[in-house]
Amino acid sequence: MSKIKSHWKNYIDGDWQEGGAGWLDVTDPASGGVLAKQAMADALDVDKAVQAAKRLHLSGVWSDLRPVERSRMVQKMGQYLLDHIEDIAQILTLEQGKPLWESRLEIEGAARYFEYYGNQGETIEGRSVPLGGSYFDFTTHEPYGVSAQIIPWNYPVEMTARSLSAALVTGNACVVKTPELTPLTNAYFAHAAEYVGLPKGAVNILCGLGHQAGAALSAHPDVNQIVFTGSVPTGIAIAKAAAQNVVPSILELGGKSAAIVYPDADLEALVSDVRWGIYFNAGQVCSAMSRMIVHESIHDQLVELLAAMASSLSVGPGIERTEFGANMGAMVSLSQRDRAAGMVSEARDAGATLVTGGHAMNSPGAFLEPTILADLTPDMTIAREEVFGPVLSVLKCRNEEEALVIANGTDYGLVGGVFTADLDRAMQAVRKIKAGQIFVNEWYAGGVETPFGGYGKSGYGREKGREALWNYVQTKNIAIRLR
Ligand code: NAD
């Protein structure tokens, strides 16, 4: 493995710069060791980045390009990521903890956003509105201008790719605030921007503390649109800041998503889905299958199958887990691991059965055993609040009505799933589950093409798919009086 650079700077106005808030140690969660130092932006650095983006926007150098030209550059940025996949994957695994093969998947997923939105860039067209013979009326879609994007630590490459690609292809200039725990890999977006020849100011990448750089960015009066992915409390703070400046925001927040399992489900396929659904990225996935609601007639049999799968996963440093398989890496930090382990232990105190896992392991790394809790009641904290770790909460139900009440019984509504051989039964549930995306018989079915976003406290606005593009443009109507 090549040695990681010791100091990582911010990329502002086409230039690599140190930050006014000093340097942050970025640690490897698998060992606790310091990997590198990241420059930390303060409010002044944020202002420099926003002004650079604003200057570019006002110049028209980026927004006035023919869409196909922007699209080609956006597509090439994705190719740049693929061309450097091994370098990026190693750094991602070292800073975030996930197995190397998962890092590669994340980078492929990130590149896919640039491919997809690169393809979509030419499809944003206005329409002509009939107003009778005396008028000609048409609409155009214009970029907002400065798009601020605040990124979480769980999928730093994919989450940045998701908003950056759509914002750029529609002609916006971007300021990305990277997560404090996993800032390093985002530097590759700046390299990609330079490589493909994006104008200065189109992509600014900076790290900083949430309550400093993040708050300064979301409250900046020259930011025209905000995309936030992260926790509910931060989402609320950002929505308030956006409201103060009367700018639109997209909030992609947490979830407590449930799979409903009926007695006729294919249990073997389901076990494999649970392996992905809750143990991929050590469960640190907003749309994780963190709850399972199982019909009582198959509950014990299914829990036994799941426990065998969970306990078969080999847990250890992601950098040693190079190939797809039954393995899991570290969580992102000791504090996230301890928080998750604490929630498991509280659940036991409240009467839950620990079926398997639940314990911290492989000290000094941030590892938690793949965990399954059963005999939960819907009112328990573990059944309502996001753990954001490798912990599956299994609840029993007697019938479909009860399953749906439990499924809809949290404040969240990000995704949901139904597992049954009966499509009519599935569709009944699909209509009633309150969530932005529903999986039938395969958790995570879908892709970059399928719109994603929450109901309830899981947020608003949609990322991914055609729907996301409309979040990055504003419609202008032009009415011409003919003489
Ligand atoms: P977080 O809210 O703590 O931080 C997210 C980002 O917001 C970080 O860059 C952070 O620095 C910044 N931030 C923190 N305080 C801020 C403030 N006051 N103003 C502006 N920015 C601020 O979330 P996290 O712990 O990094 O991520 C985990 C959470 O994100 C989980 O709840 C998870 O469900 C959610 N998440 C959601 C999605 C989705 O697409 N819905 C994807 C990934 C993660």
Image: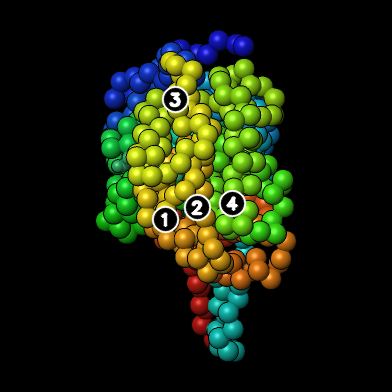
Amino acid type, mark 1:
Pro
Of helix, strand and loop, which one carries label 1?
A: loop
Amino acid type, mark 3:
Ala
Q: Is mark 1 within 8 Å of ligand 1?
A: no
Q: Is residue 101 visible?
A: yes
Residue bearing mark 2: 395
Residue 438 lies, in percent from the top left, at 59, 59
**Mark 3 neighbour density, 10 Å: few (under 14) some (14–19) many (20 or more):** some
For the residues bearing labels 2 and 1, Cβ distance under 8 angstroms: yes
For the residues bearing labels 3 and 2, Cβ distance under 8 angstroms: no
For marks 4 and 2, give the CA distance. 9 Å
Query: Nearer the observer, disc 1 or disc 4?
Result: 4
Q: Which mark is first along the chain, 2 or 4?
A: 4
Q: Quadrant of ligand 1?
A: top left
**Mark 4 neighbour density, 10 Å: few (under 14) some (14–19) many (20 or more):** some
Residue bearing mark 3: 360
Query: Nearer the observer, disc 4 or disc 2?
Result: 4
Report the disc number at residue 299.
4
Residue bearing mark 1: 378
> Which quadrant is the C terminus positioned in?
bottom right
Q: Is residue 319 above or below residue 78?
A: above
